[in-house]
Amino acid sequence: MRLRSLLFVPGDRPDRIEKALGCGADALILDLEDAVAPGNKDKARAAVAACLARTPRTTTVFCRINPLDGPLAEQDLAAIGSGRPDGIVLPKAEGAACVRTLVGKLDAGGWSRVPVLPIATETPKAVFGLGSYSEVSDLLCGLTWGAEDLPAAIGASASREVDGSYTPPYEVVRTLALMAAHAAGVPAIETVYPAFRDLSGVRAYARRGRRDGFGGMMAIHPDQVGPINEAFSPTPDELEHARRVVELFETNPGVGTLALDGRMVDAPHLSQARRILAMGSEAAHSKS
C-alpha cells in the first residue's frame, strides 16, 4: 500500500468526495470525526457508506472514525462495515491497547481484517504510549501524529512559532512519533500543513518530512497533493545515485566500505539506496 499522500475529506460532503477521487492522492481519509459537525454525523455515515459501496474501487479509501471512548465510534463502524474501507484511521489513540480494542470491535462485527492508522499524539497519555505500537505492528499500516489537539489538551496557546515551525514540545512529540513508527516497522506519516494555500510552504514542509524519515504526509486540500507526492518520490538524480551505489557493491562483493564520487559509502548507504530504488519501482508500478 503506497501512502505518500493521504487526503482528508469531510464525510458529509459527497461533492468533495467525488472531486477528491480524481485528485491523485494515494489514499483518501473520509472523515467522520472532527470535520463533521455533531448534527451531520448520520449524513456523513450515509455518504461514506455510499462511496465505499462503489465497485471497482480505484482509490485507496480510509475512514477516520470517532474516538473509541464515546458512543459514536460504534455507530461509525456499523454504518461503514459492509463497505470495508481499506483502513481505519484511529483518532485519540493512546497506544497498543487502543488498537487491540478497535480490532476486537472489528472482529466482533464480522469484519475482514483491515489495517489501522493511529493518530498517536493527540493526548498527553498518548505520548507515553508511543513505544507500545511495536506490539501490534502487524495490525498497522502506518503511524501518524498530530499537533492540533494536543495543545488544547494541555492548555498550550500554540504548537507553532510565528514562522510556522514547531515549538520545542511539539518537535519532541514529532520525533517520538517518527521513532515509534520505525520501531514498529511501519511507515511514519507526517501530519498536516494547515496553511493550505501556501503551496511553497507545504512543499518545503513535505521535503523536510521526507528528509527526516517520514514516508508520506496527510493533506487537508487537494492542491496539497501534488507537492506532497513530489516531495515523497525520488528524483531522477536520487535514483541514478542509488543505482550506482547498488552496482558498486554488487561488483565488489564482500567489501564493507567503498568510495564513490570522492565519498565513502558503506552498509547504511546501501540500505538507503535500495530503499530509494524500491520507492522508484513502486512509483513506476502505480503509473502502469
Image (cartoon, rainbow, N blue to C red):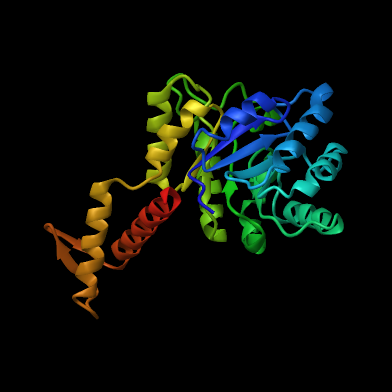
- Report x, y in % for residue 196: 50, 22
Q: Quadrant of the N terminus?
A: bottom right
Q: Is 256 positioned to the left or the right of 43 in the image?
A: left
Residue furthest left as drawn: 262
Give coordinates of residue 166: x percent, y percent.
49, 30
Q: Nearer the viewer, residue 73 or 84?
A: 84
Identify the residue at image location x=61%, y=33%: 8
- Number of numbered discs: 0
Q: Residue at x 49, y 37 (%)?
A: 24
Give 197 or 112, whichever is nearer the viewer: 112
Which of 172 and 273 lies nearest the eye of the viewer?
273
Rendered image quadrant of residue 145: top right
Residue furthest to the front in view is 55
Looking at the picture, does residue 223 appear above or below residue 26?
above
In the displayed structure, 67 sits above or below 99; it is above
Q: Percent x, y for residue 70?
A: 85, 38
Image point 44% across, 36% down: which residue? Answer: 228
Asked if one can make out residue 106 in the rendered structure from this viewpoint, the answer is yes
Residue 61: give x, y in percent of width and height.
63, 43
The image quarter in which residue 113 lies: bottom right
238 sits left or right of 187 in the view: left
Q: Which residue shows up at 48% across the image and 23% down it?
A: 161
Q: Quadrant of residue 281?
A: bottom left
User: From the viewer's perspective, is 184 left or right of 39?
Assistant: left
